[in-house]
Image (cartoon, coloured by chain):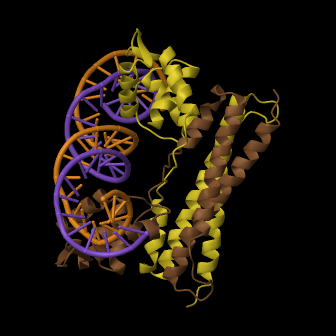
Chain colours: A yellow, B brown, C purple, D orange
Amino acid sequence: MTLRFAILGLLSITPMSGYELKKVVDSSVGHFWSTDRSQIYRTLAGLVEDGLAERETVVQEGRPNRQVHHLTARGAEALDAWLASPLDPEVSRKPFLARAFFADRLTPAEVVHLFERRRDEAVRTLEALEAIEVPTRGDLELGEFLRLATRDNGIAHARAELAWADQVLDQLRVWKP
Amino acid sequence: MTLRFAILGLLSITPMSGYELKKVVDSSVGHFWSTDRSQIYRTLAGLVEDGLAERETVVQEGRPNRQVHHLTARGAEALDAWLASPLDPEVSRKPFLARAFFADRLTPAEVVHLFERRRDEAVRTLEALEAIEVPTRGDLELGEFLRLATRDNGIAHARAELAWADQVLDQLRVWKP
DNA sequence: ATCCGCATGTAAGTGGTTACATGATTCG
DNA sequence: CGAATCATGTAACCACTTACATGCGGAT
């Protein structure tokens, strides 16, 4: 469901082809939503079928034609309705915690190694987010501010994860039962 | 994939029926993994088919018989192999951030309301996690410590989300472009 | 020569959700 | 008397992933 609206949102900024959408998704909303080409093509087909988007073939020479999609009035309405709709409680699944939960079956050294790998992943995530270019703060448009805020959210959670992993590791290293 | 191993993990502690598993999943790993009965029954059938678990019918009077499942030796091996296997990078989808990203299409008041709802959700999540009964710290077994740590992880992220929402709200309320 | 980028899609499978079906017992 | 609990499952659907298929043009 969300991908549908993420695509509507991106098309509301600029009309695009599926191929371009894939790249824009990766670079703009990539840190909180991922997808692949086949899903984008399918979703675009659904949007056209439901009258929320229209496609226009842009003929090109030497390379395949582009199917450029743009929002219809109904598409923009659907997007706005979604933005204002109730928030359904998010149940996020965390595969790592499932491992941690049963990790006492491993040797203590393996448990430490497990959390070290988690720590490393958190560091990489943090670095990737901090590497994103951002406009200078202060005097932003609302849209820019909100987009920056989604990045800040990722950073906040990556830092929380890192601090948690470090704390667990500290306690594990002094372990003696 | 993870549900399969979460069930193996729980069965490694006590043999159980699907019905009991549903309740145990909700109360033990519920804060980082959710599922429903039909999925549990399907997964159990798969585990039996693959020789990782065995079922035994426990006849009862006045109520339906229980299909109690217990791990096989191969099931325990599969569980341990999974625990030690490489961590595949987690790509978590965050529907709320998708909304926030396009929320400048709303009125400023609606944007504030959106983040207020998010804030409230974070508070509820935090309260639910803090309400979980925990053994007194210090002098824990490794397993208890790790289970406690998964709860701490949830608390850390709920606090991060709350702090983030508060910070965004502070900035939105002083907004004047 | 070989790979990468451009550009489109189909097919098959997995993991998860929702709805349906059944039927006895116990609690308010 | 109705609702909740015990206990099992099937069927259909949705979101997402992985693999496959095609073909031109430009860079290494």
Quick one: B96 or B26, which is closer to the camera? B26
Looking at this view, name the residue that lies furthest to the bottom: A177
Image coordinates of residue A171 in percent, x first then y, are 62, 79
Q: Which residue sits at x=46%, y=79%?
A: A104
Q: Which residue sits at x=38%, y=34%?
A: A39
> Taking the image as drawn, is residue B25 in sight?
yes
Q: Is residue B125 left or right of residue B1?
A: right
> Taking the image as drawn, is residue A144 in sight?
no
Image coordinates of residue A162 in percent, x first then y, are 63, 62
Where on the picture, by quarter, is residue B168?
top right
Image coordinates of residue B175 in percent, x first then y, are 80, 33
Q: Which residue sits at x=26%, y=62%?
A: B41
Quadrant location, the N terminus of chain B: bottom left
Q: Is residue A124 left or right of residue B29?
A: right
Q: Is residue A147 left or right of residue B8?
A: right
Q: Which residue sits at x=65%, y=72%?
A: A167
Where on the picture, by quarter, is residue A170?
bottom right
Residue B152's place in the image compared with A147, above or below, is below
